[in-house]
Amino acid sequence: MANMNVDRDTLRGLADEGNETALDRLAELADAAGDLGELSELLDEGSMHAGFLLTRRAAATGDLRELQRIADAGYEEAGNELDRLLKAPVEGR
């Protein structure tokens, strides 16, 4: 299979037409670039993959507020991760 280098404009056009795979690809590109703003915008557009990528980042840093924001934006797993972190035993106790 050929390694295609698809430009962002083409991906954006396909995503705007409802292509979820293109939306996921945009999320992957944003994640690789560390562009959290674009990832957040993609989540707002309904990209569950962007929600997954944002949740992974927020959980790794223990960012509870960001997990809540992601959950509020519609990615349920962020809420599950938030609950898990909130219920984790406190060190030193």
Image (cartoon, rainbow, N blue to C red):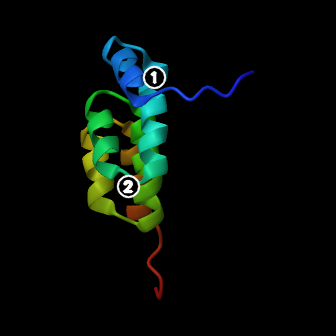
Q: Is residue 77 visible?
A: no
Question: Residue 81 placed where, x, y %?
Answer: 43, 52
Amino acid type assigned to the residue bearing label 1 in the image: Ala
Amino acid type assigned to the residue bearing label 2 in the image: Leu
Find residue 10 and report its image quarter.
top left
Secondary element at image label 1: helix
Q: Is residue 58 left or right of residue 72?
A: right
Dot 2 corresponds to which residue? Answer: 82
* Frontmost residue, 68 versus 24: 24
Q: Is residue 93 left or right of residue 67?
A: right
Please give the name of the residue rendered at 35% of the width and 42% of the height, measured from the top-left corner: 39
Q: Is residue 56 left or right of residue 16?
A: right
* Frontmost residue, 10 versus 49: 10
Task: Please report whichever mark, 2 or 1, sits nearer to the chain's N-terminal start.
Answer: 1
Dot 1 corresponds to which residue? Answer: 22
Please give the name of the residue rendered at 42% of the width and 33% of the height, measured from the top-left corner: 26
Q: CA distance from mark 2 to mark 1?
A: 28 Å
- The 10 Å Cα crowd at callout 1, few under 14, some 14 to 19, many 20 or more, is many
Depicted 92 relative to depicted 40: above or below: below
